[in-house]
Image (spheres, helix red, strand yellow):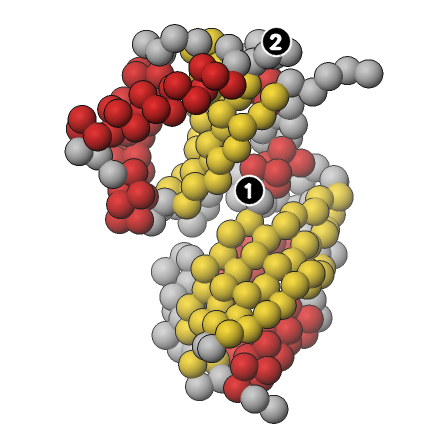
Amino acid sequence: MSATQNNKEIIRNLYEQAMNQRNMGLLQELIADSYPGLQGQLGAAGFEGPIAQLIKAFPDIQWHIQHLSAEGDQVTVQWQWQGTHTGQYLQVAATGKKVSNDGMAIFTLQDGKIIKAQIQTDRLGFLQQLDVLPADPAALTGRPLHKDWVQFIDKFRVPAAGQQAFLDRVRVNRAFLKTLPGFVTDAAYTYSEQEGDLICVTVATWANQEALDKAKEAVQGLYKAEGFDPGTFFKRLGIVVDRGVYAALEER
C-alpha cells in the first residue's frame, strides 16, 4: 500500500472506527503527540476533547464520509454527521431535535500519524437547527424582506486572543455602511463557545444588488485609504470567515 493510500485509511479509521464506534483508545495510534487540539491540549486528548463534547450532547451521533482524497502528506475529507440533541452542548440545553451538520477537514500526516488539522463546519446551519439563530435571515434584522432587497451575511469564527481587535473592526465597518446609499438596515449577533472562540454573524440589508455592489467598492476604498488588509488581519488573528448573499424567498 502506498503512503498516500495508507494516509487515507488512517483518516477512514479515524471516523469509522474511533469516532463512530467510540473506540477512543485507537486515537493513540492515529494522532501524533504534538497534535494541537482546539482547547489547548496536545495529542490524542487534544483531538478527543471536542469530539467527546459532541458525543455527550448527541449520544447517537454518526459521521458519514462523503468524500475522501489524498495528495502528498495531506488528506481531505468531507462528511455529514447526524445525531439527536439529548444533552446540553456548550450553553445550549437539550432540544431533542435530530440535527445534521456538514463539515470538511484537511489533515496533515507524518510517519503514519495526524499532526495537524484544518477543520471547517457549517456553524450557522448548526446554530439555526438548535434555534440559537433563526432559520430565516430576515428575522435577524427584525424586518420583512422586500423582494428587491438583498442581504450580505458574514459568519466569523474568532479565537479568544483576537476578539477585541475583531469587534473594534466590526464597529468601524458597521458605522461606515450606514452612511452608504442603498443601505436598509444591519444587525450583528454573537455566540461564545466553551473553548473560547466567538461566533459572530453580521447581516447587512441593501435595497438591491446594485447598491450592494457599490457598497463593496466603497468598503474596499475605505480599506485602501486606511491601509487595512482584511486578509492579513484575518490570518494574523486566526479568524475563519464564511459569507454569502441572500435574497427573499418568494411565497408560492
Above or below — where is 195 with respect to 29? above
Q: Earlier in the sequence, mark 2 or mark 1?
A: 1
Q: Which residue is mark 1?
A: 123
Placement of the N terminus among the 4 image quadrants: bottom right
The residue under the point 38% across, 19% down is 215
Q: What's the amino acid at mark 2?
A: His
Q: Position of residue 74 (x, y in %)?
A: 48, 72
Q: Nearer the viewer, residue 239 or 34?
A: 239
Position of residue 37 in the picture relative to residue 219 (left or right): right
Quickly name the residue at label 2: 146
Q: Secondary structure at mark 1?
A: helix
Closer to the camera in the image, 195 or 248:
248
Outermost right residue:
252
Q: Could you say where residue 42 lies in the image, as x and y percent from the top left?
A: 39, 69
State left or right for residue 101 relative to residue 198. Answer: right
Please name the residue shown 25% across and 35% down the image. Answer: 165
From the top left corner, tell me how far across and down residue 92 is, in percent: 58, 38
Q: CA distance from mark 2 to mark 1?
A: 27 Å
Left-right relation of 205 to 233: right
Q: Amino acid at mark 1?
A: Arg
* The one of 60 and 67 positioned closer to us in this rendering: 67
Image quadrant in which you'd find residue 14: bottom right
Q: Is residue 212 left or right of residue 7?
A: left
Q: Picture coordinates of residue 7 (x, y %)?
A: 55, 79
Question: Residue at point 74% right, 40% down?
Answer: 97
